[in-house]
Amino acid sequence: MPYEASLRDLWRVSSRLQVDAGARIDGINRYGALPSARGGVRYALDDAGLTVVKAGAGNFVGKIPLAAPAFAGYPVRTELRFDETGRTTTTSVFNPTVDRLRMPNAFAVTVQVERQIRPGMDAQVGFTRRRSTRLATLDVPEGGGPLAVRSDGRSTYEEYQISVRQLWANSQQLFVSYVRSSARGELNDFITLFNGFDQPLLQPGGMARLPADAPHRWLAWGTVNTPLWGLVVSPVMEWHSGFPYSVVDERYLYRGTPTSASFPAFMAVDMIAYKTVTYKERAADVGVQLFNLTNHKNPRDVYPVFGAPRHGIFTNSVGTIVRGFMTIKW
C-alpha cells in the first residue's frame, strides 16, 4: 500500500530574497519509505526587480512499474536460432526473476536568470541537470540464464536554454526559445521494453541516447489580433534535431552502437485562428486549427535493417491536418 506525506513553507526574507523549501516522504509497505527534500531561492539583483536569479535543487521519488514485482511469474522464455537449412543452431532459455526492487530516485538542479530588457520585452537563460537512479532495468545475459529485473538503472538529462518574449497591447505577444540538451539512459529500461509488447526482443543493454533525445530545439509562437472580423491568429513553429534510432541486422539485433543513427530534423508550422463570439451573455472562442501548415515531411518510421533493399528509407509522414474547435467561457 503506497503512502506519502509532505511539508512545505515559503519565507520572504526581504523585498529581494524569497526562499521556498519542503520535505516529503514516499513509501510502499513492501519496499519501505524514501525521504526527499527540495529547496529554491529567488533573488532580485535590483530594487526594481529587473534582473532576477532563480535556483533550485531537489530530490524526487518515483514509482516502481506495476509489472516489475510480478515479472517472476512471466513464462520461461526459449529462443531458437536456425540456419539457412532450417536446422536449430542455438537454444537459449531465459528464466524471469525479480531481484531487489527499490523506489526510483532523481536529483535535479536548475539555475535561471531573468532580465527585463525594456518594457514589454524580457529574456531568460537557464541550466537544468537531472540524474535518475534506481530505475527498474532488465539484465539480459548472453546465451540464456536468469532474466532479472532489478533497480540498478540510471539516466541523465542536461539542458541549456535561452528564451525571449515580447509583449504588446491587447495580449499580443511573441515568444522564441532555443534549447541545447542531452538525454541518455538504459537500453533495457523495464517500462520501455514492455510498454508495447508482452514478449519484446531481448538483448544485452547498456547506456545510450534515449529515443526522445533531440540535442537542438527551436520553438517560436505568438498571438496577433487582426482587423479582419476580429480574428485572433496564433502561429507556432517548432524545429528540432531528428530523434535517434538503432540500425539492426536481419535478426533485429543491434548492429554497431545502439541509437547512433538519427531521423531527419523535424519542422512543423501550426496555426490557430479564432474569433470570440457572445450569445446571451456567454462567450465562446470558435475557430480552426491547422497542423503542419507547410506539409513538411516529418517521417515517423524508418527501415532499420542493414543490408535490406529499403534500409535507411524514412516513411509514414503526416501531411496537413485541419480541425475546427470551440471553447466555451464560463
Image (cartoon, rainbow, N blue to C red):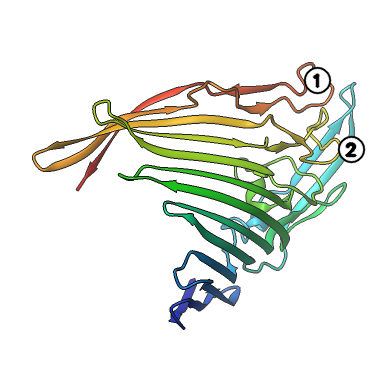
Q: Position of residue 22 (x, y in %)?
A: 50, 78
Residue plotted at (63% across, 58% down): 68
Q: From the viewer's perspective, is 38 left or right of 9?
A: right
Q: Is residue 6 above or below residue 207?
A: below
In depth, the one of 266 and 80 nearer the eye is 266
Residue plotted at (33% across, 45% down): 169
Task: Provide the residue designation for mark 2.
Answer: 90
Q: From the viewer's perspective, is 227 left or right of 294?
A: left
How many numbered badges does the structure rendering display? Answer: 2
Q: CA distance from mark 1 to mark 2?
A: 24 Å
Q: Position of residue 96 (x, y in %)?
A: 72, 54
In depth, the one of 83 and 306 nearer the eye is 306
Mark 2 nearby-residue class (10 Å; few <14, some 14–19, many ≥20): few
Mark 1 or mark 2: which comes first in sequence?
2
Residue plotted at (45% across, 78% down): 8
The secondary element bearing badge 2 is classed as: strand
Mark 1 nearby-residue class (10 Å; few <14, some 14–19, many ≥20): few
Q: What label sits on residue 308 in the rendered view?
A: 1
